[in-house]
Amino acid sequence: MLGGGLGEREWVLNAQVPAGYGRRDPAAHLAEVAEAEGLSGAGVGLMTAAEVSAYTRAWDEGVEAVVTTGLGVRTWAAAPVAGRAGAAPAGTVNIVVRVPAPLGDAALVNAVMTATEAKVQALLDAGLDCSGTPSDAVCVLAPVPDGVAGEEPFAGPRSTWGARLARAVHAAVLAGARAE
């Protein structure tokens, strides 16, 4: 990933890479791809071997989730798995979710957790025995607080924006998993 963490970003890129991607410098590679695409300034770069043109999208009361779903390397987060030789099958669930309300730092972290929980629920609802893949990523986009309207302190699944985020992510991941 490129540009992870909290801060202002101008663009998001979800780059297609080949299955068995072997570069050891993903941030540098994503910076090269962004430059080739004419993107400048601070941004977020994700990568996947899943087909990026087969993204799924869902909305819920102002929240938008865009997901690429590649489930060729399913796993449980806490499952002990030995390394594999050779190219791995295509995989990665990348989630980019946009919330129209300013979120405080703790709420942004909470939003990542909520999106991850919704992803796992969607995978289970699709009949899959996994929590995701080893390389899944989540990017939460929200306006910068302006100091006037304030910021939302929560984004858990029972908060106003967290519930909307969870439903949008769940719908997009479920659609992607079913299409896979």
Image (spheres, rainbow, N blue to C red):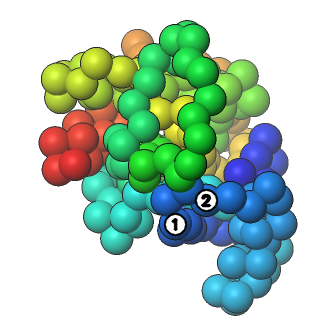
Indicate the position of residue 127 as horizontal and vertical percent values. 17, 23
Q: Is residue 45 left or right of residue 167?
A: right
Whether residue 62 appears in this view of the structure is: no
Query: Viewer-proximal residue, 91 or 66?
Result: 91
Q: CA distance from mark 2 to mark 1?
A: 5 Å
Number of on-image labels: 2
Q: Is residue 175 above or below residue 164?
A: below
Query: Viewer-proximal residue, 39 or 164?
Result: 39
Indicate the position of residue 84 as horizontal and vertical percent values. 57, 35
| Residues at circles 2 and 1 in contact by the CB criterion of under 8 Å | yes
Indicate the position of residue 30 as horizontal and vertical percent values. 72, 68
Question: Residue 21, which numbered label?
Answer: 2
The quadrant holding residue 104 is: top right
Secondary structure of residue under mark 2: loop
> What amino acid is labelled 1 in the image?
Pro
Whether residue 170 appears in this view of the structure is: yes
Q: Residues within 10 Å of mark 1 (few under 14, many from 20)?
A: some
**Residue at (36%, 48%) from the top-left corner?**
69
**Residue at (72%, 22%) from the top-left corner?**
106
Q: Is residue 120 left or right of residue 58?
A: right
Q: Residues within 10 Å of mark 2 (few under 14, many from 20)?
A: some
Secondary structure of residue under mark 1: loop
